[in-house]
Image (cartoon, rainbow, N blue to C red):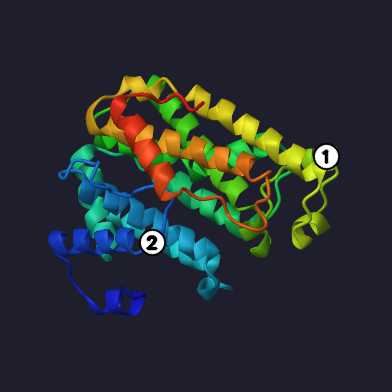
Amino acid sequence: MAESAVRERARWTLEEAYAYCAAVARGHYENFPVASLVVPRRLRPHVGAIYAFSRAADDFADEAVHDGRRLEKLALWEERLDRCLEGKADHPVFVALGETISRFGLPAAPFRDLLDAFRQDCRVRRYDRWDDLLDYCRRSANPIGRLVLRLFGHDDGERDRHADAVCTGLQLTNFWQDVAVDFKKDRIYLPAEDRKRFGVTEDDLRSGRLHEGFRALLLEMVGRTRRVFEEGRPLLSEVGGRLALEIRLTWLGGHKILDGIEAAGCDVFRARPELTRADKGWIGARALLGRWGVR
């Protein structure tokens, strides 16, 4: 629904607000399901509310229609979050989110971390070091995992750390499959010090030049990402039920895309590595059987 249509509404019922968030979730492509059928029906509206909040903020930082007003839009979104936390929501996303935050006792910090990451997207186009990239992931990806854990009743440091690793691994995987896509947006997530070490220049990325240095660089990034995922492996058995299945699907899906990057000889310029129907069948079968070995 367009923002103009949102502004025309003075009051939103909870049912309407959650329906709005569900429509946002259905209307965007993602590698992995959002509020999918794997998530218990009682939790789908709440996952949808969290997703709608982050999706809109991400679009403010990313979509061309917001050029020139990105930081302003994000500031207004945070103001709406503040009003939501005070029980004064005036937008369907925040009507729904306010109910979700109240019902599950969700902390405000993860939402603010997400907004901070999206503001960084507006200012930072290059990353010097691997650790700089991990710090970005800490705010851009990890908050979602922690919030989902809270929806399922988990609130402890050990599970949080393992969820952080899974979320960071997924974010890094997205960077490597989208090297060409991101460069068109003037963003490079391959760390500058590693690009220099392997002799990969911005001109190489601009022209889609696939040489041995680029292959070696991307293979190293893939290897590091697999090790990050491995740090999150304990989470696969630390939670149960449908949450365990959702995490297994995500963990296996991330690894499968990394497999695809390797299988393509790291040529992410000609085609974006994505999950095929056969890949999804393989992932689903292994997740259901509780077999999450990836080799």
**Image coords of residue 287 (percent x, y):** 34, 31
Residue 88 visible in the displayed image: no
The amino acid at mark 1 is Phe
On the image, the x and y values in percent for residue 66 come to 52, 72
- Contact between labelled residues 2 and 1, with CB atoms less than 8 Å apart: no
Q: In the figure, is residue 261 to the left or right of 193?
A: left
Residue 266 showing in the rendered view:
yes
Q: Quadrant of residue 214?
A: top right
Which one is nearer the viewer's eye here, 295 or 220?
295
Q: Is residue 75 above or below residue 227?
A: below
The residue carrying pointer 1 sits among few (fewer than 14), some (14 to 19) or many (20 or more) residues within 10 Å by Cα, namely some
Residue furthest out toward the front: 278
Residue 240: x, y in percent?
Answer: 25, 25
**Vertically, is 242 above or below 47?**
above
Q: Position of 185 compared to 26: left or right?
A: right
Q: Amino acid at mark 2?
A: His
Q: Percent x, y for residue 119?
A: 55, 55
Q: Quadrant of residue 29?
A: bottom left
Q: Quadrant of the N terminus?
A: bottom left
Q: 10 Å neighbourhood of mark 2: few (<14), some, or many (≥20)?
A: few
In-image side of 2 versus 31 (left or right): left
Front residue of 259/61: it is 259
Front residue (pair 157, 41): 41
Q: Is residue 203 above or below residue 85?
A: below
Between marks 1 and 2, how big is the CA–CA gap?
A: 36 Å
Identify the secondary structure beneath mark 1: helix
The first of marks 1 and 2 along the sequence is: 2
Position of residue 157 relative to residue 64, above or below, is above
For disc 1, the marked residue is 198
Q: Which residue is mark 2?
A: 28
Residue at image coords 22%, 48% = 44
